[in-house]
Amino acid sequence: MTDQLDNYLAEVEARFAASVDFTVGLEEEFQILDPATLALTNRFEELRDDGAGLEGRIAGELISSEIEIATLRCESFAEAAAQLGCNRGALLALAERQGVALGATGTHPFSRWQDQRIINTPHYLAVEDRLKYVAWRNNTWSGHVHVGVRGTDRAIAICDAMRGYLPHLLALSANSPFIESVWTQLHSARVQTFLKMFPRCGIPDAFGKWAEHRRYYELLVRTGCIEEFTQIWWAVRPHHKWGTVEVRICDVQTEPWQALAVAALAVGLIATLAASYDDGRPLPVLETRFIEENYWRAIRFGLDGKLVDFARGVEVAAPDAVRALVESVGPAADRLGLRPHIDDVERLLREGNGAQRQSKAHVEGKSIESVYAETVARVRATAGGGAAPEKGVR
């Protein structure tokens, strides 16, 4: 096992050494729905088998009522944005061909987890075997952002610093106030369901250097805690296969402009931290106990609440805390062509994110089912069209 593990980690290190800074990959997870009832339906395998032209972009995610679609590796954010729109259009066309609908909220508001089926793949059957109830209960949908970062130590330093911004990204992206026919009065029931239940999840420790991350990974493998890297489900992690920093904290977004606004802020933060690292400036690395406080506030109150600025020891309204981040990434936004989508962060703050919109409609008297129906209609109405260009790799 030692030789095999050493060879694996040598390949990971080579992958990061060859990684191209600020390439982008975007992943989105969608609910597969019965179009009449909007309940979850176990139809992933049929969509996969009918997905000609989407090979390498669609994948299963634990349950058969969920489908993930990802961009290829993109050299610029503009390319990733175009591919995301094309992906949504192609996936919607596939769904309509198969007679199903698509939903995009962090949790399904009323379908029972007991009615969902784990997909029949070796990877997810192994996840079920290890986790049992925890895996069965995980009916959640998120959006992930991959950003190319050259160098293992550099990637670890950026992950360490990004930990402190995860609550801000969660507050901005919160899109799951309902689950099991209950208005939870949380803004992200997804996080409470998934990240608070799964092992090796949520906010990781700060590692400082790649060598410490490597030692930890080697220990987990040698002691049988994990069999492979993807069984570490941290909210931000250095991705061994792609040579990226992967941000995994965000609820999936109902509309593409929302997804791109959130992703652009994540990319801008990573690029800004990389510039500071390259200039020899220390990166801001918060202790986990402080991050956990803001993490809870984002879960519970989202953009309606306050986050703590621990450097100053004061509370800040969550929208203003997000605006401060937007201002801080301005140079990176201009350099990387993020500006049109970064500007949409303000639109999201002004119009309200998914959790705010859905909760407001429910408080005004709409049923959970009718509120959800409106989000499904928005997915369909705002999907792009066409097929994504066939170039690059994930």
Image: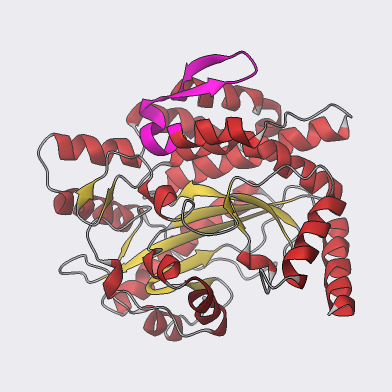
Q: Among all residues in the image, which is located at the extreme front? A: 223
In the image, what residue occupies the spot 78% across and 46% down? Answer: 156
In the image, what residue occupies the spot 34% across and 73% down? Answer: 95
Left or right for 67, reference 281: left
- Work out whether residue 61 can be spotted: yes
Q: Position of residue 346 (x, y in %)?
A: 46, 27
Q: Position of residue 199 (x, y in %)?
A: 55, 59
In the rendered view, would you say 350 is above or below 30? above
In the rendered view, would you say 272 is above or below 236? above
Give the colouring mode of the picture: secondary structure
Nearer to me, 40 or 229: 229
Nearer to me, 52 or 35: 35
Q: Position of residue 270 (x, y in %)?
A: 69, 40
- Work out whether residue 246 can be spotted: no
In the rendered view, would you say 273 is above or below 312? below
Nearer to me, 148 or 237: 237
In the image, what residue occupies the spot 89% across and 29% down? Answer: 280
Q: Position of residue 323 (x, y in %)?
A: 52, 23
Residue 260 is one of the magenta-drawn residues:
no
Left or right for 63, reference 203: left
Residue 307 is one of the magenta-drawn residues:
yes
Quarter occupied by the C terminus: bottom right
In the rendered view, would you say 104 is above or below 123? above
In the image, what residue occupies the spot 24% across and 55% down? Answer: 377
What is the quadrant of residue 10 in the picture? bottom right
Quarter occupied by the N terminus: bottom right
Give the magenta range: 297-318
